[in-house]
């Protein structure tokens, strides 16, 4: 009878417990056929399923010669089920066990067949191995020397380009230079003004809380003026310009390199350093001091706003105090970033 020939024989009666692990159950039929019943949801939210127990079962005695499926109770599924079946078939192939997918849903069977049709390339998976200290030191040293050599070569080309510009032999267009100057200068004024004003507000607010306790609120002007002119104005302008304009320059030139526009210029006999890089360097060199002066003025105005609103210091009083505290030497040091903190402290103590 069919019931006799196809009767279920539990694994427990064969010396092993029936496998019921998170959505699947394996039962051994007569004729060495292993029937895997799939039930429940097989989605990422329900977790992954391990095939290690099935691998162990296929290695036990008696060894099954065929695997079939019962998917009548299978619920929602996604790639979790496909990954499980793919691993199961890989294990079955290693042990020479036939796999019958006929009882699987059509979409599942097709996806498993597609995954098995294109096997993973040998060596595609790379294991993460941390190199030893000596290897990392050697690699870092080689990268440093290579970067240094590239920088020295670039610096040499820039110096040569500037020399040719001075003698009037550089091949660049004045219209391109004016466009870059407009982008570096007037185009950067709003963001520089915003950040500088906020820096001045913060410095004045922090200083006002402390100096007000000693009745020295007027010295907020000294604090903001010296800090902005000597340090913060130039530093924040440099950071903003490197993040805004420098990144835009790098992206523009990198795109031209990828699209072979720079190679086209070299083919036409036009030096890319003079045609592309030199106008940007000249524009930044001209605009950075002006932007720094603008940032210093806006930062001190931000400090004056806090002194006026919080400390009742009149704007004319704040201006006079700032004029006495900040001199041309401070402006020059800020522009060239020649750090001299001793002079700042001495000037601050003298009021």
Image (spheres, grey):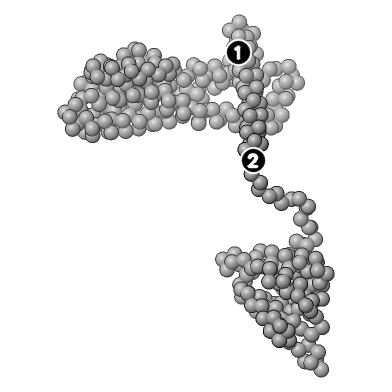
Camera-side residue: 29 or 142? 142
Total numbered circles: 2
Residue 139, image quadrant: top right
Residue 38, image quadrant: bottom right
> In which quadrant will I find the C terminus?
top left
Q: Is residue 74 visible?
A: no
Q: Are marks 2 and 1 in contact (CB under 8 Å)?
A: no
Decide if residue 155 is on the left or right side of residue 91.
Answer: left
Decide if residue 86 is on the left or right side of residue 216.
Answer: right
> Which of the two discs, 2 and 1, labels the residue nearer the N terminus?
2
Camera-side residue: 175 or 291? 291
| Residue matched to label 1 | 159
Residue 336 image point, x, y percent: 44, 16
| Residue matched to label 2 | 132
Kindly give the residue lying farthest to the left in the view shown: 215
Q: Residues within 10 Å of mark 2 (few under 14, many from 20)?
A: few
Residue 96 image point, x, y percent: 83, 69
Q: Mark 2, mark 1: which one is toward the viewer?
A: 2
């Amino acid at each position: 009878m069919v019931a006799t020939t196809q009767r279920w024989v539990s694994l427990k009666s064969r010396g092993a417990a029936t496998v019921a692990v998170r959505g699947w159950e394996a039962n051994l039929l007569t004729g060495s056929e292993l029937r895997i019943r799939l039930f429940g949801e097989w989605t990422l939210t329900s977790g992954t399923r391990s095939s290690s127990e099935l691998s162990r079962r296929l290695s036990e005695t008696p060894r099954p010669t065929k695997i079939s499926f019962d998917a009548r109770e299978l619920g929602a599924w996604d790639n979790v089920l496909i990954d499980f079946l793919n691993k199961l078939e890989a294990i079955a192939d290693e042990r020479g066990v036939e796999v019958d997918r006929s009882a699987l849903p059509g979409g599942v069977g097709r996806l498993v067949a597609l995954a098995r049709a294109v096997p993973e390339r040998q060596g595609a998976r790379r294991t993460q191995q941390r190199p030893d200290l000596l290897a990392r030191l050697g690699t870092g040293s080689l990268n440093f020397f290579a970067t240094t050599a590239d920088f020295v070569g670039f610096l040499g080309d820039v110096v040569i380009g500037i020399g040719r510009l001075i003698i009037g032999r550089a091949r660049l267009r004045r219209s391109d230079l004016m466009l870059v100057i407009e982008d570096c200068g007037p185009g950067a004024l709003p963001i520089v003004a915003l950040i500088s004003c906020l820096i001045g507000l913060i410095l004045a607010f922090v200083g006002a809380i402390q100096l007000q306790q000693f009745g020295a609120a007027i010295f907020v002007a000294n604090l903001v003026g010296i800090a902005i002119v000597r340090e913060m104005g130039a530093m924040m302008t440099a950071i903003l310009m490197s993040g805004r304009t420098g990144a835009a320059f790098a992206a523009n030139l990198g795109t031209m390199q990828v699209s072979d526009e720079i190679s086209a210029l070299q083919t036409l006999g036009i030096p890319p350093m003079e045609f592309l890089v030199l106008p940007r360097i000249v524009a930044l060199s001209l605009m950075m001091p002006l932007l720094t002066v603008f940032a210093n003025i806006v930062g001190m105005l931000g400090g004056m706003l806090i002194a006026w609103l919080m400390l009742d210091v009149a704007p004319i009083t704040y201006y006079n105090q700032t004029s006495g505290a900040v001199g041309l030497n401070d402006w020059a040091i800020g522009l060239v970033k020649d750090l001299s903190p001793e002079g700042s402290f001495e000037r601050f103590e003298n009021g």
